[in-house]
Amino acid sequence: MTGWDLKPQGIQGVLKSTGETASHLEGQAKAYGEHLTSAASSAGTVSAEGGGGKAQGGLVALALSQYAEHATKDLQYIALRAGKSLQGAVDATTAYLRGDEEMAARAQRGALAEPRVDVPGVGGA
């Protein structure tokens, strides 16, 4: 790959700020889960049989639970994708600085590979 002109100091700054931003994902995902749990427990019950009440459960709680199950995989994917992208940028830059542009291109391609998300209890895992 000819024509690369990397500036290590600029790359280091971008990786640092991106890494700091990505590190907040874990806390935000935890807060997200807590908010969904709170919403589900505060929803009361509205069942197919009618009626309402303060007991936990019901259609709203079920819908929130199913949504959370789906969204959890998406959130994990985002975190894995961010981590792989950052590591790929580090690996490609390191290889470039060592003078091995082919190695840098391989590291970039590796960073673009789809991450595999294994959620315990979901999808037969």
Image (tube, rainbow, N blue to C red):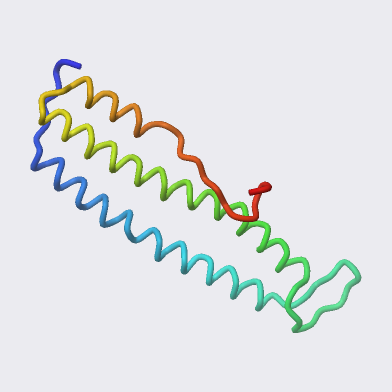
Residue 43: x and y in percent read: 69, 75
Residue shown at the point (23%, 36%) measured from the top left: 91
Q: Is residue 61 left or right of residue 102?
A: right
Please, is residue 26 above or below residue 77 in the view?
Answer: below
- The residue sitting at the top extreme is 2
Residue shown at the point (35%, 30%) measured from the top left: 110
Residue shown at the point (14%, 45%) measured from the top left: 12
The answer to which quarter of the image holds residue 52 is bottom right
- The residue sitting at the front extreme is 125
Q: Is residue 13 left or right of residue 45?
A: left
Foreground pick, 98 / 23 = 98
Q: Is residue 28 left or right of residue 103?
A: right
Foreground pick, 124 / 63 = 124
Please, is residue 31 above or below residue 103 in the view?
Answer: below
Please, is residue 72 above or below residue 97 in the view?
Answer: below
Residue shown at the point (54%, 71%) measured from the top left: 35
Disc tally is 0
Q: Is residue 94 left or right of residue 55?
A: left
- The residue sitting at the bottom extreme is 54
Residue 75: x and y in percent read: 49, 52
Residue 36: x and y in percent read: 58, 68
The answer to which quarter of the image holds residue 1 is top left
Please, is residue 38 above or below residue 54 in the view?
Answer: above
